[in-house]
Image (cartoon, helix red, strand yellow):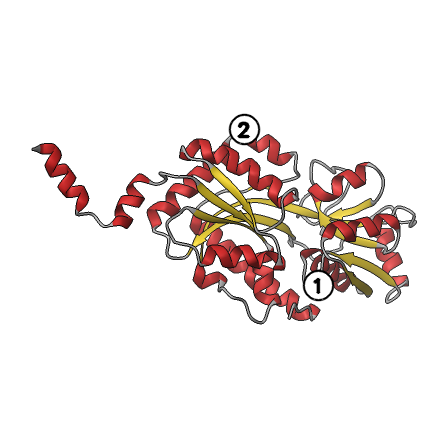
Amino acid sequence: MIRRSLLALVAGLPAPALAQEAFPIRPVRLVVAFPAGGPTDVVARIIAERMARDLGQPVVVDNRGGANGNIAADAVAKAEPDGYTLLYNTSSIAISRALYKTLAYDLVRDLKPVVLTIAVPSVLVVNPALPLHDAESFITWARANSGKITYSSGGVGNSSHLLCFMVMRHIGAEAVHVPYRGTAAALTDTAAGNVQFTSDSLVTVLPLVQDRRVRAIAVSSEERNPLLPAVPSMTEALLLPPGLDIGTWQGLMLPARTPSPIVVRLNAAVNAVLSDSTIRARLQAQGAHIVGGSPEDYARYLAKEIVRWQGVVSESGATAD
């Protein structure tokens, strides 16, 4: 009799309530906004592997690269809001909002922040054949050759483009922007001397710095990074205004209508990952600053980043349309 009463009670519950109570009861899909093997994918897989242990279900990585991360973002924005499809995004999602006149999704309306995972500084690097060994010599050289020098980026509106633009604007120099299809090619051509400088994520740049194929001038974080302790921050080196911390960051988002209990459950799972000492060591080896926090923390941070990049993109004149 009691069992029949319980079954009747459960049968009367709406399907969403049942899903929330049991979540997750099947594998979760983590849609990564960039191709497999890249720095974003590497971090996403470290997080997904450990996250699966906490959730008790596999977390399957699904790489959906292209259009500055917008293909993945659009797919998740239109997915069923049941918690089984998450977006692993980077700061490109805030830049895209300013860069594209029209997008198939609305970042604020269609996606819900879960947690900010890590921030990775960018590094300004030069071709090692240049007689530039520090920020002071870089600034002197850039001003003396203003308008004649070149820098590469991963594409118009890419963070590497915008960071170099911000540095040039701050020091009062001009340089010709040479966009590439991705930062790998941009970095390779800087190492080859076809362009003279660029910026890229620390995790991508570090092997080339260690092999002396490029020379590091400054890191974009507000403080020096332990992986490059002899390299100053850009604010310390007077390449950016004081208090400005520019780099790439990563986080998780869900379709906007995902129920709050599921958001809370996934937030707790990711924070557990970021608190794991083994995972922290692996992420720090990638040059990452580990963040974590609440969905509200991420929402506030995202709102500030949207405003920041709207201003930078507008001033640079960059557009993807």
Answer with the quarter of the image where residue 153 lies.
bottom right
Image location (x, y in percent) of residue 3: 13, 33
Vertical arrangement, residue 276 with respect to residue 117, above or below: above
Q: Residue visible at 50% across and 42% down?
A: 292
Q: Position of residue 180 (x, y in %)?
A: 76, 58
Query: Quarter holding the N terminus?
Result: top left
Q: Is residue 242 above or below residue 2?
A: below
Mark identifier at residue 283? none
Q: Quadrant of residue 229?
A: top right
**What crowding class fits label 1: few (fewer than 14 Cα within 10 Å), some (14-19), or many (20 or more)?**
many
- Figure quadrant of the C terminus: bottom right
> Mark 2 is on which residue type?
Ser
Q: Secondary structure at mark 1?
A: loop
Q: Which residue is mark 1?
A: 156
- Marker disc for residue 277: 2
127 vs 169, nearest the viewer: 127
Q: Is residue 173 visible?
A: no
Q: Secondary structure at mark 2?
A: helix
Give the Cα separation between the discs numbered 2 and 1.
38 Å
- Residue 191 visible at all: yes
Residue 271 percent location from the top left of the image = 46, 38
Residue type at tag 1: Val
Q: Is residue 29 left or right of residue 213?
A: left
Tell me whether circle 2 and circle 1 mark residues in contact (CB < 8 Å): no
Residue at 90 percent of width and 62 percent of height: 144
In the figure, is residue 267 to the left or right of 172? Answer: left
Q: At x 44% / y 61%, what residue is drawn?
A: 110
